[in-house]
Amino acid sequence: MVRKTSIIKGERVQLPTKYGHFELIPFQEKISGLEHIVLIKGNISTKDNVLTRIHSSCATGDIFGSLKCDCGEQLIASMKLIEKEGQGIIVYLQQEGRGIGLMNKIKAYKLQEQGMDTLEANVHLGFAPDEREYEVGADILNALGVHKIKLLTNNPDKINKLEQSGIKIVERIPIIINSNEFNKDYLSTKETQMGHQLSENDT
Ligand SMILES: Nc1nc2c(ncn2[C@@H]2O[C@H](COP(=O)(O)OP(=O)(O)OP(=O)(O)O)[C@@H](O)[C@H]2O)c(=O)[nH]1
Ligand SMILES: [Zn+2]
């Protein structure tokens, strides 16, 4: 089922980067005004198995290289894999802090400094462990003529929600980053309590 589009598609421009040569298209949600960024490599329209990363914004990890999560490294790894594949898409969704926004994510970080894990902190603040939705991601892929993808993710919830929004995931490709002393508890919580597939033997 293809939903009626709720987004505005911007101009398409070249974006040479340290990790490969891409094209960039901004999208904007009609109602909220929220802006999302898409990077494209190659001729992806109407292809059936486009290598795709749906990435949720993480200012701390993506911009500043925070070691508290794996986001920044996952983004760079995705860009490199797409460059190597010669085609693919990165949909960079503005849903900071698993959808609770920057102010609340930093409140959640404060609670984690006081001993809570990432999930308990969200719940303590009155949010679901993960508030993200992926319909707009599906709308963006549909607007690009892409309906079947190979998804770079360890997160089964992302797969389920994208499929519910009409995107066919033909393959899941893990994107596992080595842990460090600052993110090992966070990654362990994602694996044991949020179903993320972060080990070699996860399927
Ligand atoms: N609320 C909250 N959000 C966080 C925290 N750490 C990272 N985030 C946000 O989590 C989101 C990334 O989610 P992840 O669960 O790391 O990864 P994912 O995209 O669901 O899964 P993958 O596709 O496997 O990477 C980004 O929006 C980050 O800003 C935290 O402690 N609390
Ligand atoms: Zn992060």
Image (cartoon, rainbow, N blue to C red):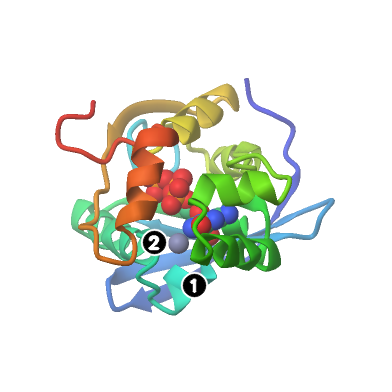
Residue 168 got which mark?
Answer: none
Residue ID for mark 1: 60
The quadrant holding residue 156 is top left
| Mark 1 vs ligand 2: CB below 8 Å | yes
The quadrant holding residue 172 is top left
Using the image as rendered, state which of residue 115 and residue 184 is in the foreground. 115
Chain-order first, disc 1 or disc 2 = 1
Mark 2: secondary structure: loop
Q: Residue furthest front?
A: 114
Residue at 27%, 71% (x, y): give it.
Answer: 19
Give residue 5's position: percent from left, percent from top. Answer: 72, 39
Residue at 25%, 60% (x, y): give it.
Answer: 83
Q: Quadrant of the C terminus?
A: top left
**The disc labelled 1 sits on which kind of residue?**
Thr
Residue ID for mark 2: 69
The quadrant holding residue 130 is top right
